[in-house]
Image (tube, rainbow, N blue to C red):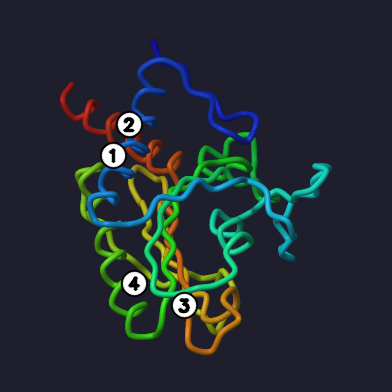
Amino acid sequence: MNHINNDIGALYLRGKSAEKIDKIQTDLKNRFSTLDFEYLWLPSLSSKQYFHPQNIESSHRNGYLVHAACLSFFDQEQSFSDGRFFGINRVHRLEPLRTPYSETRLECFNVFEIILTGDDKFLSKEYDFVKEAVKGFIEDYLKIKCEWRIADDSFIDSDQKKEELIFNKEGKKFSIASGNVHGDFFTKRKDIFSCCFGIGIERLFLAGEILEKERHGRKK
């Protein structure tokens, strides 16, 4: 039995649909653990709040809800070296452009997050490697070709690169994954930098559902 609902700004699933999205998370963890990335258990709260127009004011006693999956990592880590990490985080944001018909512009969603820290040489090589690994996983899951493009917005500031992997099928167009270069914004060091990749798990699931309906329609 299937049940899908996102009227509340978050995705509720039951039955086969819930199994599908859970398998996406499992397959992502399996893929990146075999690539020798270190596991993270990421909390949805940070000890400090980074200014952002999508931040949600929290009444939690000690923590602030994060609008981006990597923020709790940089909140907890105090020293940095060459590192490759992955984990899943649930993020919360204000989405003023959300309408009752916004299937993908959710205000609470799960992100498979990959975080890289290191010097210029390490980060440059690893960024390209992860970029291809993310693209490969999404192409394998959706069974279509995907391409990265430069994003219209930025994660940190306009001087730092942001790329997006866009799904564009059946009149639906949205970003499934992003790659974000941070520079020394989080590390506060001139010799160690960071970047992150995020895969929207709900968006990847919904893209798969759109394609499945399209393929099913062609078979009729």
Q: Is residue 200 left or right of residue 144?
A: right
Element marked by disc 1: helix
- Real-space Cα distance between discs 4 and 1? 21 Å
Q: Identify the residue at image location x=57%, y=40%.
A: 102
Is the residue marked by circle 1 packed among few (<14), some (14-19), or many (20+) residues within 10 Å? some
* Residue at the limit of the structure toward the front, as seen here: 79
Pick the quarter of the image with the N terminus. Answer: top left
Given the image, on which type of amino acid does mark 2 rest? Lys
Q: Identify the residue at image location x=34%, y=42%.
A: 170
Q: Earlier in the sequence, mark 4 or mark 2?
A: 2
Q: Earlier in the sequence, mark 4 or mark 3?
A: 4
Q: Nearer the viewer, residue 150 or 220?
A: 150
Q: Identify the residue at image location x=34%, y=27%.
A: 20
Q: Earlier in the sequence, mark 4 or mark 1?
A: 1
Element marked by disc 4: helix
Q: Nearer the viewer, residue 139 or 123?
A: 123
Q: Is residue 88 left or right of residue 29?
A: right
Is the residue marked by circle 4 packed among few (<14), some (14-19), or many (20+) residues within 10 Å? many
User: Which of the labelled discs sits on residue 127, or is there none?
Assistant: 4
Pick the quarter of the image with the C terminus. Answer: top left
- Real-space Cα distance between discs 1 and 2? 6 Å
Q: Nearer the viewer, residue 111 or 42?
A: 42
Given the image, on which type of amino acid does mark 1 rest? Asp
Closer to viewer: mark 4 or mark 3: 4
Image position of 112 with respect to 162: above or below: above
Q: Are marks 1 and 2 in contact (CB under 8 Å)?
A: yes
Q: What residue does disc 1 label?
A: 27
Q: What residue does disc 3 label?
A: 161
Q: What residue does disc 2 label?
A: 23
Quarter where residue 147 is shown: bottom left
Is the residue marked by circle 2 packed among few (<14), some (14-19), or many (20+) residues within 10 Å? few
Given the image, on which type of amino acid does mark 4 rest? Tyr
